[in-house]
């Protein structure tokens, strides 16, 4: 059964084309992926990301449960702060990457689309197994999530609230009143641009808010943005898409997320990671820019001197660079900066250069 | 916006169009196909001189998110390809029936054209 966003009717009226993603029918594009992509990079765009999950973690040991089940030590994350992290199996592979928000006594976690039940079940099972007094509740159906992203996002949203949005720092989160609707705001996003995400309940209230934000951003040329541009925007910044980059079981070390790991606490999967770290000989997620014509796609092999050295997990045409870009897992010997690799597209090698993310730099706009 | 279907062309149910000019058939993708694909960003053209059979893969057209194969609507030899599309693939979006043509095929068996759809039949399937 395919779920629809609460804003489905509004999307239809705005001319959306739909796609199915992780069990949700969501807009893939409104105008065109390229146009929407550049709108977010240059000005501001509004995304319905209700396919993402909402999970409450409550109880006296809520913080302990997060520290146990993620690579983050939640005691280090103060109230009104959010954190990007990963939930691991005992073997160190990633179940999901997620953001959790510290909201007073409670924590809200945002697992990926289609992951709400898996994560809820896992956390509740681990709470019981480790005798931790905390409850995880899947409330995804009660929330709409909107993302407002782009250099003009703050100015747009500021028109609708009395709270000075400059006081909401990067990765800050709090309750806020936007256009008369009480929601949870976080200064986060998936585009690499200035941006905010709003968690709204009950969903009914989001319909009016969605239109009010579009209205507030009119002077900046705001547009509704689909999942197509969401994917190209994140890939240009080297952000992971769980369904692509964790497919088949990958550890945070392989996914080059070691910066998220707090080694000073005990968590599920830690022993396996320590073993892998010591061994060192594992493939690592690598960003690449094509130096020849061609668009890499997931599943394309990566070769060096005719030998397979890796596989593409995400690839697209970069709307900012107008060249093919990709992320894939490559053996450590072949991923030095500027290293030239062959991506095999329809049996033909296309040359690509290894780069350090972000693939598209922050000051891209000033270079055009 | 209604997709344009031209009366003087022949069509396939996989959304290629064909215009016979003497012995040579010009081939492209329909307005409907380009509007479904949106933002065409890459085209892979066949080599001139290559022999193709009706139904063979002819070219690859890619949008930001999708890869679509195009099939030969007719058998013959590739006489010419629209090289300019390699630099400006968006021409297919802007002018699918004129500047955005893809290949010219020297037709070996003209009777194959009878098996293609006329404008009215094509309109019914889009």
Image (tube, coloured by chain):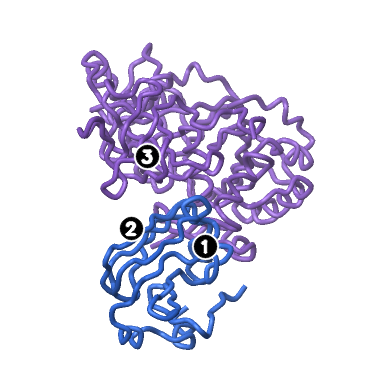
> In the image, A304: left or right of B24?
left
Residue bearing the label numbered 2: B47
Residue B54 on image: x %, y %? 28, 74
Quick one: label 1, few (<14), some, or many (20+) residues within 10 Å?
Answer: many
> In the image, B10: left or right of A248?
right
Q: CA distance from mark 2 to mark 3?
A: 51 Å
Figure quadrant of residue A301 = top left
Badge nearest the viewer, 3 or 1: 1
Residue at the (28%, 63%) spot, across then down: B50
Q: Nearer the viewer, residue B61 or A70?
A: B61
Q: Secondary structure at mark 3?
A: helix
Residue A272 on image: x %, y %? 24, 21
Badge nearest the viewer, 2 or 1: 2
Q: Secondary structure at mark 2?
A: loop
Given the image, what chain letter belongs to the residue carrying mark 3? A
Of labels 2 and 1, earlier in sequence is 2
> In the image, A241: left or right of A142?
left
Q: Nearer the viewer, residue A124 or A171?
A: A171
Residue at the (47%, 38%) spot, across then down: A235
Residue bearing the label numbered 3: A119
Quick one: label 2, few (<14), some, or many (20+) residues within 10 Å?
Answer: some
Residue A238 on image: x %, y %? 46, 32
> In the image, A243: left or right of A40?
left
In the orientation shown, which residue stands out farthest toward the front?
B22
Residue bearing the label numbered 1: B92
| Colour used to depict chain A in the structure image | purple
| Colour used to depict chain B in the structure image | blue
Circle on res. A198 = none
> Is circle 3 on the same chain as circle 1?
no
């Amino acid at each position: 059964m395919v779920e629809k966003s609460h804003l489905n009717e509004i999307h239809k009226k705005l001319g959306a084309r739909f796609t199915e993603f992780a069990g949700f029918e969501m807009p893939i594009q409104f105008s065109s992926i390229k146009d929407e992509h550049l709108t977010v990079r240059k000005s501001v765009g509004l995304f319905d990301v209700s396919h993402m999950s909402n999970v409450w973690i409550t109880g006296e040991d809520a913080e302990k449960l997060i520290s146990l089940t993620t690579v983050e030590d939640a005691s280090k994350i103060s109230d009104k702060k959010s954190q990007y992290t990963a939930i691991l199996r005992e073997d160190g592979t990633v179940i999901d990457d997620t953001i959790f928000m510290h909201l007073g006594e409670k924590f809200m976690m945002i697992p990926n689309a289609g992951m709400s039940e898996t994560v809820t079940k896992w956390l509740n099972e681990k709470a019981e197994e480790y005798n931790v007094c905390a409850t995880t509740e899947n409330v995804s159906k009660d929330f709409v999530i909107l993302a407002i992203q782009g250099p003009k996002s703050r100015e747009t949203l500021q028109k609708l609230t009395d709270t000075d949005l400059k006081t909401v720092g990067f990765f800050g989160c709090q309750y806020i009143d936007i256009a008369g609707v009480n929601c949870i705001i976080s200064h986060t996003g998936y585009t690499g641009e200035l941006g905010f995400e709003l968690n709204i309940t009950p969903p009914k209230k989001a319909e009016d808010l969605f239109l009010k934000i579009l209205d507030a951003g009119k002077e900046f040329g705001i547009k509704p943005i689909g999942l197509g541009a969401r994917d190209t925007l994140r890939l240009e910044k080297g952000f992971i898409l769980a369904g692509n980059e964790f497919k088949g079981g990958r550890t945070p070390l392989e996914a080059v997320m070691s910066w998220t790991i707090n080694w000073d606490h005990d968590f599920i999967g830690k022993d396996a990671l320590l073993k892998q770290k010591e061994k060192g000989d594992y493939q690592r997620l690598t960003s690449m820019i094509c130096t020849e014509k061609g668009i890499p796609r997931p599943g394309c092999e990566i070769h060096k001197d005719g030998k397979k050295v890796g596989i593409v997990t995400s690839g697209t045409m970069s709307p900012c660079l107008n060249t093919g870009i990709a992320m894939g897992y490559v053996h450590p010997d072949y991923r030095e900066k500027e290293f030239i690799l062959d991506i095999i597209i329809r049996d033909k090698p296309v040359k690509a250069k290894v780069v350090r993310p972000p693939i598209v730099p922050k000051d891209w706009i000033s270079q055009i | 916006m209604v997709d344009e279907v031209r009366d003087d062309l022949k069509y396939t149910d996989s959304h290629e169009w064909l215009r016979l000019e003497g012995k040579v058939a010009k081939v492209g993708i329909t307005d409907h196909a380009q509007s479904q694909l949106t933002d065409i960003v890459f085209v892979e053209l066949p080599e001139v001189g290559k022999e193709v059979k009706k139904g063979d893969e002819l070219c690859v057209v890619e949008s930001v998110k999708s890869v679509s194969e195009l099939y030969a609507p007719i058998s013959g030899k590739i006489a010419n390809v629209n090289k300019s599309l390699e630099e400006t693939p968006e021409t297919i979006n802007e002018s699918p029936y004129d500047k955005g043509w893809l290949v010219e095929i020297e037709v070996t068996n003209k009777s194959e054209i009878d098996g293609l759809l006329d404008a009215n039949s094509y309109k019914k399937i889009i």
